């Protein structure tokens, strides 16, 4: 069976990303001739050309593009396996939870309190992600568990449990035609300008590109667009804006997610603690018409949260 060493795959990915031997060599901290020799060795072993080279240009072949896509996943998997092995052997390992700022629907404090009662509870480190990379944190091992919003976050390769189900609201400026409505339907939004942005729900619109909900709310306030968000992501409605429930929008789910291949007791214990209130019936994820418990006054503090044994 033909195989590549991890180091060779790292060399290839660096060149595939940079498409420049000099820059890739600097990135890898090796000499350019050594990189060229390694790439030729990889192509010889695989029996296919990976790059088209000229004196001024480096380009991936179809075979190179395929190896770039799958090779990156392979490197991430190897890195995650190493990190999981190291963490599994360390009894002092902290549990790392990733979420977007304010993206806990008011549930995090209760979850941490429940988890603190576990006899095997660890310190929980809170990691704040960018607009749309929480799933990557879980896949590559940077985080152990995460709070994600479905269907907006990519759950491919992740196991998950639903913590809360809620409706969506359309956010408009106070002078907008929908501002006086008690409810709206998706058809009422036709012709409106919606935002663009990878980490934004309904972020495939034709309006200005925004990086997060904060930027989106600012653009809505000045009349450049409207937005549709899960109710809990809005929190207290900022001045100059109005939230109107969208009655026929698919519901949003706040889920606790983790890598589907992660079987560590560290993760299983946290998941069990997070789900315990649901199974006791003390937290309802069925009533999407009401704001989540504590959504208005329980905002997430930035930093690390420690749980004690």
Image (cartoon, rainbow, N blue to C red):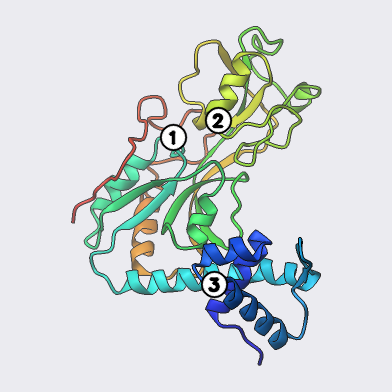
The residue drawn where x is 72% and y is 37% is 204
From the top left corner, tell me how far across and down residue 236 is, in percent.
46, 20
- Residue under label 1: 102
> SS for tag 1?
loop
Residue 45 sits in quarter: bottom right
Tell me whether circle 1 and circle 2 mark residues in contact (CB < 8 Å).
yes
Q: CA distance from mark 3 to mark 1?
A: 46 Å
- Examine the image and state in which quarter residue 11 appears: bottom right
Q: Residue at x 55, y 71 (%)?
A: 75
Residue at the spot of label 2: 213
- Horizontal side, residue 113 vs residue 275: left or right: left
Q: Nearer the viewer, residue 269 or 15?
A: 15
Query: Crowding at label 3, few (<14), some or many (≥20) Cα neighbours within 10 Å?
Result: few
Circle 3: element type: loop
Q: Residues within 10 Å of mark 2 (few under 14, many from 20)?
A: some
Q: Are marks 3 and 1 in contact (CB under 8 Å)?
A: no
Disc 1 to disc 2, how far (Cα)? 10 Å
Q: Relative to residue 44, is residue 291 drawn left or right? A: left
- For disc 1, the neighbor class at 10 Å (few under 14, some 14 to 19, many from 20) is some
Q: Position of residue 261 (x, y in %)?
A: 50, 70
- In the image, 134: left or right of 152? left
Percent position of residue 69, x then y: 68, 66
Name the front one of labels 1 and 2: 2
Examine the rendered structure and indicate whether residue 303 appears above or below residue 243. Answer: below
Q: Earlier in the sequence, mark 1 or mark 2?
A: 1
Circle count? 3
Q: Secondary structure at mark 2?
A: helix
Q: Which mark is residue 173?
A: none
The quarter of the rendered structure image containing the N terminus is bottom right
- Mark seen at residue 31: 3
């Amino acid at each position: 069976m033909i195989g590549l060493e991890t180091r060779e795959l790292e060399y290839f990915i660096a060149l595939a990303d940079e498409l420049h031997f000099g820059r890739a060599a600097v990135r890898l901290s090796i000499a350019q001739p050594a990189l060229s020799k390694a790439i030729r060795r990889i192509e010889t072993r695989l029996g296919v050309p990976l790059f088209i080279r000229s004196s001024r240009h480096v380009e991936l072949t179809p075979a190179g593009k395929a190896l770039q896509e799958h090779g990156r996943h392979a490197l991430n998997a190897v890195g995650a396996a190493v990190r999981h092995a190291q963490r599994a052997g360390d009894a002092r390992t902290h549990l790392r939870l990733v979420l977007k700022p304010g993206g806990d629907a008011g549930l995090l404090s209760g979850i941490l309190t429940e988890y603190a009662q576990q006899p095997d509870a660890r310190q929980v480190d809170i990691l704040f992600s960018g607009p749309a990379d929480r799933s990557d944190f879980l896949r590559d091992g940077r985080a152990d568990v995460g709070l994600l919003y479905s269907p907006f976050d990519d759950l491919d390769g992740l196991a998950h449990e639903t913590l809360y189900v809620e409706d969506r609201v359309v956010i408009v400026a106070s002078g907008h035609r929908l501002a006086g409505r008690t409810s709206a339907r998706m058809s009422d939004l036709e012709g409106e300008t919606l935002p663009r942005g990878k980490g934004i729900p309904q972020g495939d619109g034709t309006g200005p590109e925004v990086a997060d909900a904060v930027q989106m709310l600012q653009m809505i306030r000045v009349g450049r667009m409207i937005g549709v968000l899960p109710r809990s992501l809005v929190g207290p409605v900022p001045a100059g804006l109005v939230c109107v429930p969208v009655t026929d929008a698919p519901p949003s789910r706040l889920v606790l997610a983790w890598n589907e291949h992660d079987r560590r007791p560290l993760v299983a214990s946290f998941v069990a603690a997070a789900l315990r209130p649901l199974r006791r019936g003390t937290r309802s994820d069925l009533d999407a018409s009401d704001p989540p418990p504590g959504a208005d006054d329980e905002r997430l503090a930035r930093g690390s949260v420690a749980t004690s044994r």
